[in-house]
Image (cartoon, grey):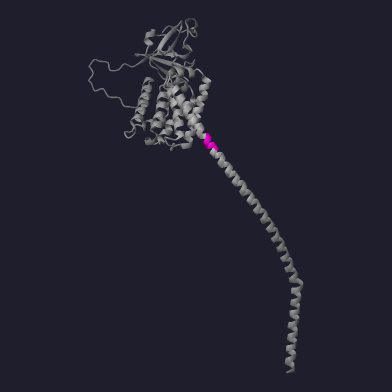
Amino acid sequence: MMGEAEKECKQIEIAVQRHRKMLHYVTKKCVPLLETKLKEADEKSVAWKERALKAEGRVALLERQLEEKINQMNNYKRLYEGQYQVMIKIGSVMGEIVWKSFKSQSNVKMLIQAQETMQKYCALTKGIIDSFLMAYDSNPPPLQSMEHVFVISVLGAITNLAAFAEGRAFLAQQEEMVQLMKKMVLSQERWSFAHFRLLKRMVLTFAYNMSLEDPVAYFMLSEERLVSCVLRCLSLNDPTDVVAVAVAIIYRLLSSSLQAGIPSALPEKPDVTDPEYDKVMYVRTYKVFYGETSLLKADYHGAKIQIVRSKQSSVVGMKGIVVLDTKGTFKMVSKDDKLRTIPKRDSQFEVICGDRVVTIFGKHLSARPAERAVKKLKIFAIPDL
């Protein structure tokens, strides 16, 4: 019994010692460490609270600034919209005034004389129509909208300007207007006939007026996409006025190509008549140089000029060519005394007179028609033709 009691006392004593060691470890090491950690956590918590308060103040400030910016932007938007509508209205009224003024040929002649001002007007017109096409593309605004009315007035003005010979001659010299015509014709294909018939018809009318100038007609013939867009307007389901303008454009281009001597891709109708036994079917055209034949000025009237070698190959042949004599030199001009070819020293021309072809070199042509008899040019003398 005594041995068991001593054994239990030893175990209790060992447990007490362990407890004291654990208590000493906890009180001396763990508690200070925990206090340190808690203190650091409290400090961080206070710091984060301060940062949160500052962030809340900053967010509130930004929200107030954003609200002020939104209110300011809305005010500016209303102001700009009002100014935009006023400018569109003023532009529409001014456009209609210019539109109506271009209906008079005397006004057109007077305005064309101010070349610099008209060039600025053309640049302004191109900018307005380009921005309209860029903004709306295939979905133009409604017919009653101010934008639509404004663009119609601007387009109508240049259409009337191109309706007169002086106006379209000036516009044909402006490369930007020719490119604008091409862009409008290509864009009108995406517009609905039902809603934008007036706009399509005006675009095609402007293209037709411009095509009355031979250089523009040759440019249109060289653009396959442009001609294809016009051909796609020839549908039975399309409005009659739009189809009529498209037909007029195609007829004008075909006439220009025939006058210029451009061969047609259409097959010719075969001749089914039986020729006589001794009739000559075909006589080959031969070339005669100017030193080997003598032709009168009347022989050149109405003759076609084929350019064999020239820097301006688009001028291929003209109708109604007349030759004017100027003491050893001559010029090929039209009935309105305008030079129809642009002779260069290295150019070579073939004048087709009936069954004869006369070759003439550009150095034998004078540069421009003489205004008076005393101002006739005497440049390169050549033998009589």
Where in the figure is residue 146, as x and y percent of width and height? 46, 34
Q: Is the residue 297 above or below the residue 141 in the image? A: above
Q: Is the residue 17 above or below the residue 292 in the image? A: below
**Which image quarter: residue 339?**
top left
Region in magenta: 79-83
In front of the other: 330 or 186: 186
In front of the other: 209 or 296: 209
The answer to whether 113 appears left or right of 323 in the picture is: right
Q: Magenta segment, principal secondary structure? A: helix
Q: Is residue 91 visible?
A: yes
State the residue at coordinates (40%, 27%).
Answer: 205
Q: Is residue 289 visible?
A: no
**Which image quarter: residue 166?**
top left
**Which image quarter: residue 184?**
top left
Where in the figure is residue 379, as x and y percent of width and height? 50, 9
Where in the figure is residue 74, as x and y percent of width and height? 55, 42
Quadrant position of the N terminus in the picture: bottom right
Quadrant position of the C terminus in the picture: top left
Where in the figure is residue 264, as x and y percent of width and height? 35, 25
For the view shown, which residue lies furthest in the bottom direction?
1
Q: Is residue 382 magenta?
A: no
State the residue at coordinates (41%, 36%).
Answer: 190
